[in-house]
Image (cartoon, rainbow, N blue to C red):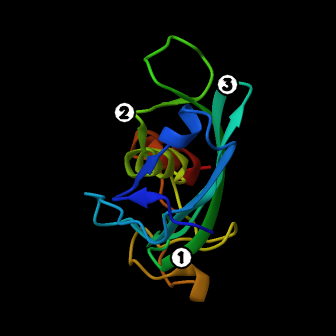
Amino acid sequence: MINQTDNNFLDISKLLSGELESLPFDLGEISFPCEDEEIAVSSLRFSGLAKDISGFIRLIGTITGEHSAPCARCLAPVARTFSIEIDLSVVTAPTESDEDVILAEGQKIDLGTFVTETVLLNLPLRLLCSEDCKGLCPKCGKDLNKGSCECDHKEIDPRLAGLADFFKDK
């Protein structure tokens, strides 16, 4: 696949002038700026095809990569790969369409910004090491996936503590 990009910008001038009907691209490794130290995204790549379809430009491709973060229940490190399919229109002027569109800046498309936004919107809110993760004991902090703890989990709600005394007399 031909790399038609310069610093994550895809030059679509030949598509706009009608010289080409399709333009393959591969961004290779993309740096992912993320301020959240808990989430790491690596091996980010965007490849696909910009295609002239009856005077409209469609951007069709796949964003792939890996994200890692601590498990939301037990804090164990978790890494997952992801793949996001993209199919959207390219516009040269802002529109009020509900359809997924990307705005071309002159005769170039800033794919780096688009990829970053798309990945952030598609990252899971909670990453779990497994669906049946038991998490950590709220009292001692032991990982309950590795075995049960010796803590007494029979706490009485303080609002109902007076009722416990009521049943002792009978």
Q: Element at badge 1?
A: strand
Residue bearing the label numbered 2: 105
84 vs 7, left or right, is right
Q: Nearer the viewer, mark 3 or mark 2?
A: 3
Q: Residue at x 39, y 71 (%)?
A: 139
Q: Mark 1 or 2, which is nearer the eye?
A: 2
Residue 57, percent from left and from top: 63, 33
Q: Position of residue 4 (x, y in %)?
A: 49, 59
Query: Does residue 147 appear in this view?
Result: no
Label 2 secondary element: loop
Q: Give how far apart the Cα atoms at labels 3 and 2 are.
A: 18 Å
Q: Residue at x 62, y 34 (%)?
A: 18
Label 3 and label 1: CA atoms lie apart by 42 Å
Compute the Cα span from label 1 to label 2: 35 Å
**N-terminal of the two: label 1 or label 2?**
1
Question: Dot 3 corresponds to which residue?
Answer: 55
**Left or right of 15, for residue 13:** left
Please identify the residue farthest to the left as the structure is shown: 35
Mark seen at residue 24: none
Outermost residue toward the front?
Answer: 19
Q: Are marks 1 and 2 in contact (CB under 8 Å)?
A: no
Q: Residues within 10 Å of mark 2 (few under 14, many from 20)?
A: few
The amino acid pointed to by label 1 is: Ala
Is 37 in front, or is 91? 91
Return the mark for residue 79: 1
Tell me where residue 53 appears, x and y as whole percent.
73, 31
Q: Is residue 166 above or below residue 43?
A: above
Does dot 3 land on a helix, a strand or a loop?
A: loop
